[in-house]
Amino acid sequence: MATVDLHLHTTASDGRLSPTELVKLLGERGLRIASITDHDSTEGLSEAYVAKEQFPDLRLIPGIELSTEAGDSEIHVLGYFLDWKDREFQRVLSGFREGRVGRGRAMVNRLEELGLPLEWERVLHFAGDGAVGRPHIALAMVEKGYVPGVKDAFDLYLGRDGPAYVDRQKLSPVDAVGIIRGVGGAAVLAHPSYVKNLDAHLVRMKDAGLAGMEVYYSHYPPKTVRKLREIAKRFDLLPCGGSDYHALGQDDERLPGHIGPPEEVVEALRARCARGAASPTED
Ligand code: AMP
Ligand code: ZN
Ligand code: FE
Ligand code: FE
């Protein structure tokens, strides 16, 4: 059981717990430091900070997960300690979320062509107020009985090589690092085991100011953690991580605090914020 979890989702994107419900779970599970990292959204943070008042031993760090395209793979970049209330930053995030709607509709059109029609309203129903994502399409597919579970929807249709997959906006990983640093934050490469040509991407992202990469992640076994810790060391990146909890209800889903970095990594991350350790944003 880890006391730090720096990768968590809520209903502000494709998680199934509201920020209040998630914070309650974090408190009950004895987490000491956590970051909510919704996809292209910080809309859950205000509510989370209110909920956190019931849990004085829990420290919440503002976070985000940005989706980027790297030609050969999809790369997710996490950001921490950001000045998330910055208006220009919020405008950029709104643009990304609008892009998600267009992409979601395009994927629903593909599914229709494949003989699996969905009502767009059902996708929006599952998304609620949150940033639309493939998991919401997957849930609508499960509801229709097209697939038994969310994972099957990804394996058969929505995964990167699947017949209903549609590319996202062309934000590069280096751009994402720049956006995060532009609001005073520290950028961290998410789930690196999914990244093809990892070394080449790390060289470019490190040049752009990448602070860390996930080493402790969801299902990663000790062997993978060891390997990634060595790569992080070689690139002088802080070994970060967390559960990537979505509350999707899959049997093998890892709960918050299942895995995470040691507490001292958080202070080191703070020190690597774009504006230095002087005044990173904590709420
Ligand atoms: P999107 O943001 O629309 O590109 O969807 C990406 C999200 O889908 C990821 O952050 C995960 O939450 C989820 N996801 C990706 N691959 C899978 C998979 N194979 N099974 C279940 N969920 C997945
Ligand atoms: Zn997600
Ligand atoms: Fe991700
Ligand atoms: Fe995630």
Image: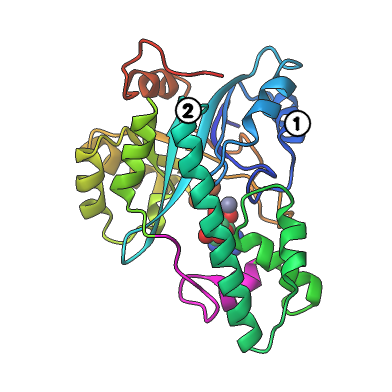
Figure check: 62 above or below 151: above
Residue highlighted by disc 2: 86
Position of residue 211 in the picture relative to residue 22 (left or right): left
* Residue 162 colored in magenta in the image: yes
* Residue 111 colored in magenta in the image: no
- In the image, what residue type sits under mark 1? Thr
- Mark number displayed over residue 20: 1
| Residue segment shown in magenta | 151-169
Position of residue 151 in the picture relative to residue 70 (left or right): right
Q: In which quarter of the image is the N terminus?
A: top right
User: Residue at point 63% right, 48% down?
Assistant: 13
Q: Quadrant of the C terminus?
A: top right
- In the image, what residue type sits under mark 2? Asp
Residue nearer the viewer, 52 or 108: 108
Camera-nearest label, 2 or 1: 2
CB atoms of marks 2 and 1 within 8 Å: no
User: Residue at point 32% right, 67% down?
Assistant: 72
